[in-house]
Amino acid sequence: MFVYHVERDIEHRYISVFDALESLENPRPWAPHVSRNTMPGEDTTTPRICVAGSIEECFMGCTLSPFLRCCANVLGMSRYAGPNGEAYPIIVNTFDVDNPYAPSAYEVPDAPYTGELWLVEESIPIRRELLWLTPDAIEAYGQKEYPHEVWPEWEDFYIVNHVNLLTTEEVMRMKLNHPWLNRQGHTLDSRRNASLFWSRELRCLADVWRKVA
């Protein structure tokens, strides 16, 4: 079966968009590890690669907090969304595995709701894709009844119905803004549209797009 892992905040993990694109070509083995961002009550001893059966479940497992700029269509979160005309990069990793481990609620309290799965052995993605989120990319709604007996802070939990993803070619043709695209706009983790310093020495896709478009 195919399972997925979403890499976010990649602007801080790669020097430039070209380094990110280069990383897609020859996927390296991933070693299981224990995340530093475990939720209260989650297993903190078992090394694993956290994956899910859909992109939407990946976002639910992360919670929407890292994707606030993409929640224009999410009730109660639209005030955090980025301005129209921006786009934010993520990398979607696809693994082809036979029997991913399904953690219990004792191991991951929200796993029965998010669909989180674990790969507990070293694994290599069969595909890595650089894709883009717009400010209205996420469609989600909050639960009417919160399972307080599982996690007392589940008021922040949303069911994600759909995540609209754009290719790099699509965002370039739509002339959307992001430092990696045209040195304009903001990164995914920007808050309150704070101004962004971006080195003019770093190439962006617009520098080469004119030559091939």
Image (cartoon, rainbow, N blue to C red):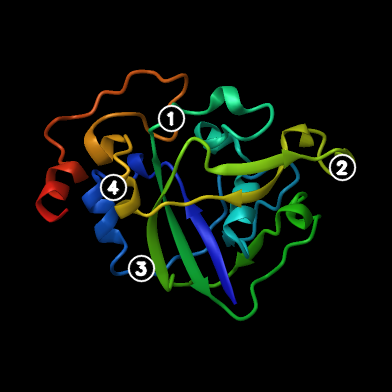
> How far, Cα to Cα, is label 3 from label 4?
31 Å
Q: Nearer the viewer, mark 3 or mark 2?
A: 2
Q: Earlier in the sequence, mark 3 or mark 4?
A: 3
Task: State if disc 1 and disc 2 touch (CB < 8 Å).
Answer: no
**Separation of residues labelled 4 and 1 (CA atoms):** 15 Å
Q: Earlier in the sequence, mark 3 or mark 2?
A: 3
**Which numbered dot is residue 28?**
3
Residue labelled with disc 4: 173
**Residue 42 position (above or below residue 75):** below
Q: Position of residue 155 (x, y in %)?
A: 78, 32
* Side of 144 where 159 appears, left or right: left
Which type of secondary structure does the marked residue at label 3 adopt?
A: loop
Mark 4: which amino acid?
Arg
Tell me the kind of residue under disc 1.
Answer: Asn
Measure the C-alpha gap from mark 4 to mark 2.
44 Å
| Callout 4 touching callout 2 (CB < 8 Å) | no
Residue furthest bottom as drawn: 98
Q: What residue type is disc 3 on?
A: Arg
* Residue 129 lies in quadrant: bottom left
The residue to which callout 2 is attached is 147
For the point 50% across and 32% down, which residue is it?
69
Q: Residues within 10 Å of mark 1 (few under 14, many from 20)?
A: few
Q: Mark 3 or 1 closer to N-term?
A: 3
Callout 3–callout 4 Cβ contact below 8 Å: no
> Which quadrant of the figure contains the N terminus?
bottom right
> Could you say where residue 187 lies in the image, as x and y percent from the top left?
38, 33
